[in-house]
Amino acid sequence: MFEKSTWIRLPRNVVIGHGVLDQTLAAVEELHLSGRPLVVSSPTPHAVAGERVVEQFAAAGYDPAEIVIEEASFDAVQRVIAHAEEVEAGFAIGVGGGKAIDITKMAADDLGLGFVSVPTAASHDGIVSGRGSVPEGDTRHSVAAEPPLAVVADTEILAEAPWRLTTAGCADIISNYTAVRDWELAHRLKNVPYSEYAGALSQMTAEMLVDSAGSIKKGLEESSWIVVKALVSSGVAMSIADSSRPASGAEHLFSHQLDRIAPDAALHGHQVGVGAIMTEYLHSGPKGRWRDVRDALGALGAPTTADDLGIDHETVIEALTTAHEIRDRYTILGDGMSEEAAIEAATVTGVV
Ligand SMILES: NC(=O)C1=CN([C@@H]2O[C@H](COP(=O)(O)OP(=O)(O)OC[C@H]3O[C@@H](n4cnc5c(N)ncnc54)[C@H](OP(=O)(O)O)[C@@H]3O)[C@@H](O)[C@H]2O)C=CC1
Ligand SMILES: O=C(CO)COP(=O)(O)O
Ligand SMILES: [Zn+2]
């Protein structure tokens, strides 16, 4: 008997372009959500877009509530849940970078509320995904969360954000190459479920971004357009897989470990990019394609070395040797790298 089934949750409205922040209300009204909107943001995104979203809904008679969170943590999720209950929110709008969007989608999931994603930076591919990523103690959870019903990505706002946020988004996409390799490996070695569609989409997204590198330049709004479309596509791959596997492998474990050892040293996307150079080396050896990964990152202006990240060499080696402990996700790191092997990988690839 045939017993397979799948349930793919994708956004209904994806609105991307110049000035589309002003269409947030229209994108939401199309969804037939009811009740009071709760606008969740972090400090800078609140100033650059959150206030405008609140004004838009207030002008339409919605009585919007708002909350500003400072960090990505389970405490912050709880604060948003408590506030949403207090103000009797009917749906949640996350305005910001990965931090604010993750917190909103996790709180919305807990409360059973609709979630709308309004990215203010093209810095990460959680814009569309139904996953939340939050550190806790020695580990980092990738948890199921409410996928967005709508995404409103205003390229004018994304283009005005600091350029390094856009190069971080590019690097988060380039890391899909190694993430998919790790996923395939885990499928072959550990029988981890693998989706050909999600794997192919994730890989194709990275290829298309690299092919467009010549058009991704500081000061060009079109760059934000190209990058955010790739971030959406990568998020869709995660939704198809119902896992962050298509976009998160050993290079992400390395970055999550850096977040623990050297908090706030560098952006998520930049860390996973540097991690991908080394994990590609581990997959394909000294003559393999790690140079292609490094060159693609370099062409887009993303960091390729520990010094570029502003992280000392010892910390990089420590993160590499302990990354496998972060969570139960089989990757090329297996049950861990020796210090000598980590130094070799980081040195040959020029990361340290
Ligand atoms: N769920 C998923 O599938 C995924 C989740 N992630 C998660 O997302 C996070 C990384 O996202 P990232 O966006 O790099 O991190 P943040 O949300 O911390 O944003 C990075 C910085 O950019 C600032 N910022 C955001 N928008 C603007 C703007 N328009 N102008 C000026 N500054 C701005 C933020 O300000 P402020 O400090 O005020 O917030 C913050 O200082 C990580 O926690 C990562 O784990 C990443 C990929 C996928
Ligand atoms: O960052 C992500 C995809 O780019 C998601 O990562 P995690 O599932 O490893 O938290
Ligand atoms: Zn990522």
Image (cartoon, helix red, strand yellow):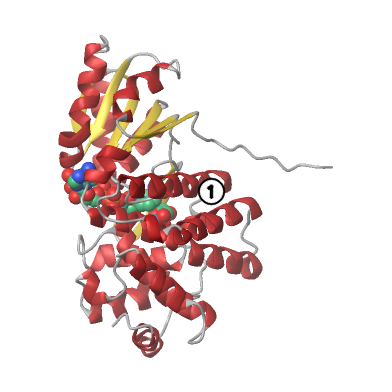
Residue at disc 1, secondary structure: helix
Instruction: Give the left or right position of residue 187, taking residue 322 as reference.
Output: right
Q: Residue at x 26, y 75 (%)?
A: 306
- Res 85 → quadrant: top left
Rendering coords of residue 25 (x, y %): 33, 20
Q: Residue at x 38, y 44 (%)?
A: 225
Instruction: Give the left or right position of residue 191, taking residue 312 as reference.
Output: right
Compared to residue 217, the image places residue 120 above or below, namely above
Q: Is any atom of residue 326 visible in this view?
A: no
Rendering coords of residue 104 (x, y %): 32, 36
Residue 137 or 312: which is nearer the viewer? 312
Q: Ligand 3 quadrant?
A: bottom left
Q: Which corner quadrant holds the N terminus?
A: top right
Q: Residue at x 27, y 24 (%)?
A: 38
Compared to residue 334, the image places residue 234 above or below, namely above
Rendering coords of residue 31 (x, y %): 45, 19
The residue at which mark 1 appears reads as: 237
Instruction: Give the left or right position of residue 83, taking residue 248 as reference.
Output: left
Rendering coords of residue 266 (x, y %): 23, 63
